[in-house]
Image: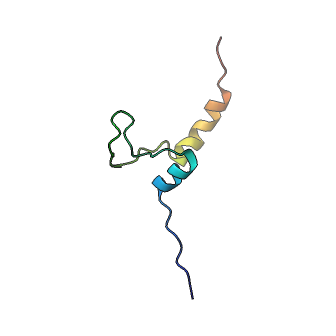
Amino acid sequence: MRKTAMQITWRGMYQRLLKVDPLKCVLCGSQMRFTGLKRGYRLAEQVLMHEPLARMRWCG
């Protein structure tokens, strides 16, 4: 008899790891809705930027 894998959600992982509900409003405590995700640079952009970033020096 096969067992089905338990589905793990992003919200559930966040709650277990940080003990905080990521969709609970910190101001009023009401339930928020996840509407989208903003991502960072793509891999190709990071590869192009890695050498100039490595050459940067702290001023001061």
- The mark tally for this picture is 0
At x 56%, y 42%, the residue is: 46
Farthest residue, direction bottom: 1
Quarter the N terminus occupies: bottom right
| Relative horizontal placement of residue 49, taking residue 29 as reference (left or right) | right
Query: Which one is in front, 16 or 43?
Result: 16
Q: Decide which of 32, 56 is in the foreground and name it.
A: 32
Residue drawn 39% across and 35% down?
26
Q: Position of residue 8 (x, y in %)?
A: 50, 62
Residue 55: quarter of image: top right
Q: Which x, y percent locates residue 27?
A: 36, 33
In the rendered image, the quadrant that contains the C terminus is top right
Locate residue 30 relative to residue 13 in the image: left or right: left
Vertical position of residue 20 compared to residue 59: above or below: below
Which residue is nearer to you in this view: 4 or 50?
4
Q: Position of residue 12 (x, y in %)?
A: 49, 55
Q: Residue at x 52, y 70 (%)?
A: 6
Can you name the residue that lies furthest to the top here? Answer: 60
Residue extending farthest to the front is 29
Q: Looking at the image, what colour scheme do you see?
A: rainbow
> Residue 7: percent from the left, percent from the top?
49, 67
